[in-house]
Image: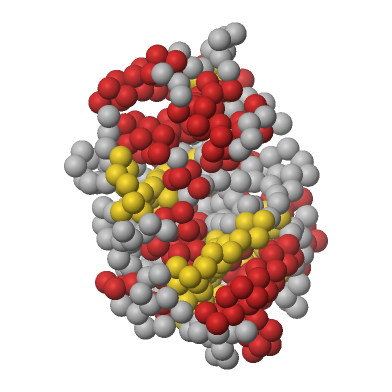
Amino acid sequence: MYLGIDLGTSEVKFLLLDAQHQIHAVVGEPLTVQRPQPLWSEQAPGEWWAATERAMQRLKAEHGAALAQVRAIGLSGQMHGAVLMDAAGEVLRPAILWNDGRSGAECVELEAACPRLHDIAGNLAMPGFTAPKLLWVRKHEPDLFARTATVLLPKDWLRFMLTGERVGEMSDAAGTLWLDVAERRWSAEVLAACGMTEVQMPRLVEGSEVSGVLKAELAARWGLPAGVVIAGGGGDNAASAVGIGAVRPGEGFVSLGTSGVIFLTSDRFRPNPASAMHAFCHALPGTWHQMSVMLSAANGLRWVTHLVGAASEAALLEQVAQLTPQQRARAPLFLPYLNGERTPHNNPHAQGCFFGLTNDHDAAALGYAVVEGVTFGLLDGWHSLGVQPGEVESLSLVGGGARSALWAQLLASAIGVPMVTRRGGEAGGALGAARLAWLADGGAVEEVCRAPQVAATFAPDAAEAAVLGPRHARFKALYRAVEGLFPTA
């Protein structure tokens, strides 16, 4: 039995997987995000640990027999977050999260201070990444910066609590901007540009390697065997790729989680910073990936559900599904940039916008506009990846939004590639984390990382694509028209 722990933005998820690929249990505990100032996004690491404790006690009470058979634990988590610790291991401030946009000025400073940044990190400096966050702390909280002995990413802080070890792994570390992504090691050059050294960085392992052993007192309290090993794990998207078997070149997925992602596996480092796409290490040795990222995806659907007073996201989607093609074609356009944007705009100040509202529009029209707007944002990201026709046969669809057949079909028609949903695909990073635990316990990639059973396939619809094409052109024109109107302070 293998336990996967996925530290997300909105919840910590736990998944028990056996050696026959059967999921025995999935348990989640909710998390909240604090936004004390505009552009800020923070969480207290102590809340992550409290949620972990609650979830483990639930697993013990409800699935104690399975928990007692766990051989290894894998970790997945939200990327880029900065957890600052002092020499004693105490957390110095709330973690600054992936969707925090405060460090725009520091991105400009980092690009100037490290001219080779793009060659080393393979990515533009963006506020979401970890390195600009530390430049912000150095400038605005110098006392805390001086006391910072270690910087850990969210799931790696959870590892510290589980094992006492300060360890990171390649896929998550690639999202800091401090990693030499081609060489899979920390870059002293980029660290120096941030006033930091390798001493402040955790030891690195591959995602499928052992990173430590669960503390004896935790194993006893939670009902796990002694000596359970902890795998390196992966950033949420790399772990999700392992979970749906996207580990070979040309394989990939679309994630409709809080953020939206298109992920493609590669056998080499393929950076293209000019397009604002990401080039990172994968969670398995000798593999890399390209990724386009938008900061609001299923988050946008959640927002509009509350806005229109619908009973639930599923209920709103049912209303959307009743719209005729003509009603969809007359729906307002929606810019989905509720938290700024990465690919392809790299604009932390971008905001959401409904355009073309009339008295005829209702909750269903607004719901459709949001789903379509997120789809168009992902389409822009797809174009940034530079994929050639025929290079990708299909994309798996994962995340909470994968439950919507309407959204899956819209994505297939817009992108022009079949979308495939898979059994257990909604488990996302937690399933991949469990598989990485299995690999750390000696499992073979060919057996462990096979693609789960197909649940449904959505082929591109030419008629729908013909309607979406002109609307996407207007969508892009709308962004260009309002780009200069977004407030920057």
Of 32 and 401, nearer the camera is 401
Q: Position of residue 180 (x, y in %)?
A: 44, 62
Residue visible at 50% across and 32% down?
318
Q: Is residue 195 above or below residue 462?
A: below
The residue shown at (65%, 26%) is: 308
Q: Is residue 142 left or right of residue 225?
A: right
Which of the 4 image quarters holds residue 158?
bottom right
Residue 285 drawn above or below residue 215: above
Q: Outermost residue, right direction?
A: 143
Q: Quadrant of the C terminus?
A: top right
Residue 459 or 472: which is nearer the viewer?
Answer: 459
- Residue at 23% x, 40% y is 388
Q: Give the x, y percent position of residue 66.
A: 52, 79
- Say if 417 sits above or below 248 in the image: above
Report the side of 483 relative to 33 (left or right).
Answer: left
Of residues 325 and 167, the one nearer the viewer is: 325
Name the residue located 70 percent from the left edge and 44 percent from the top edge.
40
Residue 197 in view of the camera:
no
Q: Say if 383 sits above or below 205 in the image.
A: above
